[in-house]
Amino acid sequence: MGPGRRPASVAVTYRPPRPAELGDCALVWYSAVDGYMARLNRPLPSPYLDPLVALLQHLLATDPERFLVAARSPAAHGGRDEIIGFGIAVQREHVWFLSQLYVLPHEQGKGIGRALLTQILPSAPAAAGEAREAAGGDAAGDHAPGVLAMCTDSAQPVSNGLYARFGIVPRIPIFNLVGTPHPSTLSRLPAGIEAVPFGRHDPTATIASIDRAVLGYAHEVDHAFLRASGRTGFVYRSEDGEPVGYGYSSEAGRFGPIALLDENLTAPVVGHLMNAIRPRGATTAWAPGSNDRAMVALLRAGLRIEGFPALLCWTRPFGHFEGYLPASLALL
Ligand SMILES: CC(C)(COP(=O)(O)OP(=O)(O)OC[C@H]1O[C@@H](n2cnc3c(N)ncnc32)[C@H](O)[C@@H]1OP(=O)(O)O)[C@@H](O)C(=O)NCCC(=O)NCCS
């Protein structure tokens, strides 16, 4: 073995997951995040993994070629592969977004996360990233054909360091806001702005055009998944019928995504969604720091910042996050 080779990588294979292994991936997620949060004195509550498994099923259906597991070979484990890590990215138009990358705590620091990442990166930008890295890493991403992006935890130097070496550098904080909202503190929708429930018209084309203008890419497959997972949405229209944005919330308390062409509508739209859909328990939202209007509205409605902020990372800018509030960190 030459210098710099990692012995643990030898026995690990990288391959697409079998559908029955998505539960194993969810457990890897739980162990990895719990191990990391426990070190920060913030251990996770006991796992409720069904929503994550549903998300992984969706991503396996939309991006099968970008979903890999790291497995220990059957010979060493009585015939059944042990899933020790996984990575999944989505390609939406020109934006490649890393949804998840997790490695079991006792397998971390052996090159497995990096191996998963390099195998699911798009080949041309990955090669460009490697070349830049070998050359000492000049201004990253400028010549890449697409955009690479992801969300990381601000308190996690490993992931921030790993991704930034490919030019996927933390750019803006995203705050988790949680609580029981009191939307009466927010202004109402201005006269002339109508909230049209998605059920009344097929919103597909409208949402795609709003997404391209605000988020930078359309992703109807993910909207369909969000609706199937219990999120309810509205298109907001001006007096002349022109769409000015859309927003979602859910009875489970998952708030967003919201995309607005007119940022002045942020507080009234946040208030409208909070009034229209009353969750059974707490509301949780992810607000980019650049969307100052959403931060202010959510805080004024009584939500409070939970934990450390996450960081939105990219090689090149792609969206207008002053007007966007993502669905989650795993799927913008
Ligand atoms: C993040 C994670 C997926 C990385 O996987 P891993 O197998 O531990 O990572 P690897 O051993 O392949 O590589 C880690 C890289 O981080 C780099 N790194 C570690 N600490 C660093 C620091 N302080 N600054 C910069 N880079 C650092 C290492 O140098 C290494 O890069 P290299 O291979 O080029 O030397 C894994 O540690 C994990 O699951 N952590 C807990 C959960 C988590 O935080 N997930 C990411 C959420 S954003």
Image (spheres, rainbow, N blue to C red):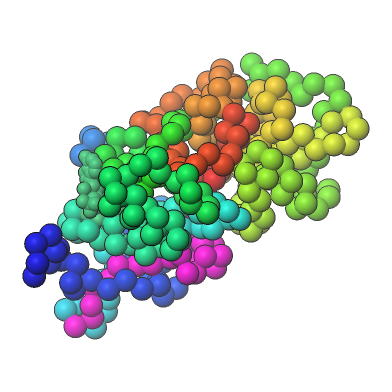
Residue visible at 46% across and 24% down in the picture: 304
Picture quarter with the C terminus:
top right
The number of numbered discs placed on residues in the rendered structure image is 0
- Which is more toward the observer, 4 or 300? 4
Residue 292 screen position, x and y as percent: 55, 22
- Which is more toward the observer, 279 or 137? 137
Residue 168 vertical placement versus 99 (above, below): above
- Residue found at the very far right of the displayed protein: 240
Residue 105 screen position, x and y as percent: 21, 53
Residue 244 vertical placement versus 102 (above, below): above
Residue 44 screen position, x and y as percent: 31, 43
Residue visible at 68% across and 26% down in the picture: 263
Q: Is the magenta stretch mostly helix, strand or loop?
A: helix
Residue visible at 68% across and 45% down in the picture: 212
Q: Does 274 lie within the magenta span?
A: no
Residue visible at 85% across and 36% down in the picture: 242
Residue 40 vertical placement versus 13 (above, below): above
The residue segment tinted magenta is 49-75
Residue 179 in sight from this viewpoint: no
- Which is more toward the observer, 129 or 83? 129
Task: State the image quarter where residue 185 is shown.
Answer: top right
Residue 132 in sight from this viewpoint: yes
Residue 252 vertical placement versus 267 (above, below): below
